[in-house]
Amino acid sequence: MPSHEENIIEILRRRGPSLPVEISKELGLDSFLTSAILSGMASSRKIRMSYKRIGSSRLYFLEHQYESARKILLSHLSIQEKNVLNRIKSSGFLREEDLTPHEKFFIKELYDFVIPTKINGIPGFKYYAIPDSMIKIQKEEPALFQKEEKIEKKERPKQEVSNFEDKVINYLKNLGSEIIDKKVIRKGKEFNFIISIKTPLGNQIYHVKAKNKKKITESDLSVAYTEGMRAKKPVIFISNGTLSNKAKKFKEKNVGELLHYIKIS
C-alpha cells in the first residue's frame, strides 16, 4: 500500500503545484497532519515549498514544476510586490542599499523570483532567470547605479521629521497605508498602530509595534507577536534600533513571516 508521501508525490505529478488543503482532500487526511507531512517532505527536499504564501499557506510542488508554481504565485503578488519585482527584473541585479525601506518590507515575499546574492562583495538581489554573466557585465558599469541614485534623490526629496513618532507615521504613510488606530504606550518611546494596506485581494490589516530603542530583544518581539496573535493580525515591528542575536533567532524559529521587522533611521 503506497505511503502518504508516495501519494502526495503522485498527486503533485497529476495536479501540479497545490495548496495543503487541496492535497488533504485528495488524501482524505486531516489538514493539520497533511501540512506536517508536506513540511517534512520539503525539509528533506523530496518536494519544493514556496516562500510566498497564498493566504496563510505555502504552495507545494515538484522540482521541475517551479516555473508553473511561479506563474501561480505571480498572480497572488500585491501591486507593491510586483513593483519591486519589476524593478529587480529590469536591472537583473539590484543592490540592497538601493532598495527603499518600503521595498525592503516586501522583498522576502519575492524569494521565489529573486535570489539574495553578492556581486564583488556587494549584497543585493538577482532576478532568478538572469544569467550571472549579464550581471557581472552590468556591475562593471557603476555609473548606471550612480545615475539611478541621482534620479532617486530628485524624485524623493528628503523630508525632515522631528521625532521618532513622526518618523514612524511618515513611514507608514509612504507605505501607502491608512492608520486606523494609534495607542501611545510610552510617550516618545513606544506606540501601537492598526493599519490597513490595500492589496489586489482587498485590504490587509496589520498590528504595528513601534519602539524607540537601540537594541531590540527577544522579549520585545515576543510581546509584539503575542499582541498580534490576540488581535488575530500579522505584525510589523518598526524601530530605529537593531535586533539582538537572540531576537534574530527567535524571529527565524518562532514567528517567521508573521512578524516583519523594519528598521528606520
Image (cartoon, rainbow, N blue to C red):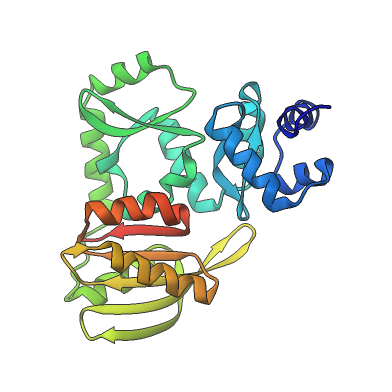
The N terminus sits in image quarter: top right
The C terminus sits in image quarter: bottom left
Residue 156 at what x, y percent from top left? 28, 56
Residue name at image x 40 percent, y 77 percent: 193
Residue name at image x 83 percent, y 45 percent: 28
Residue 49 at what x, y percent from top left? 58, 36
The number of callouts visible is 0
Q: Residue furthest front?
A: 1
Residue 185 at what x, y percent from top left? 30, 85
Q: Is residue 229 left or right of residue 252?
A: right
Residue 51 at what x, y percent from top left? 52, 41
Q: Is residue 134 left or right of residue 154?
A: right
Observer-nearest residue: 15 or 83?
A: 15
Q: Is residue 152 above or below residue 113?
A: below
Residue 33 seen in the current view: yes
Q: Is residue 255 left or right of residue 25?
A: left
Residue name at image x 36 percent, y 72 percent: 223
Asked which quadrant contains residue 171, the reply is: bottom left
Q: Is residue 14 left or right of residue 189?
A: right
Residue 178 seen in the current view: no
Asked which quadrant contains residue 26, the reply is: top right
Residue name at image x 57 percent, y 34 percent: 42
Q: Is residue 182 above or below residue 262?
A: below
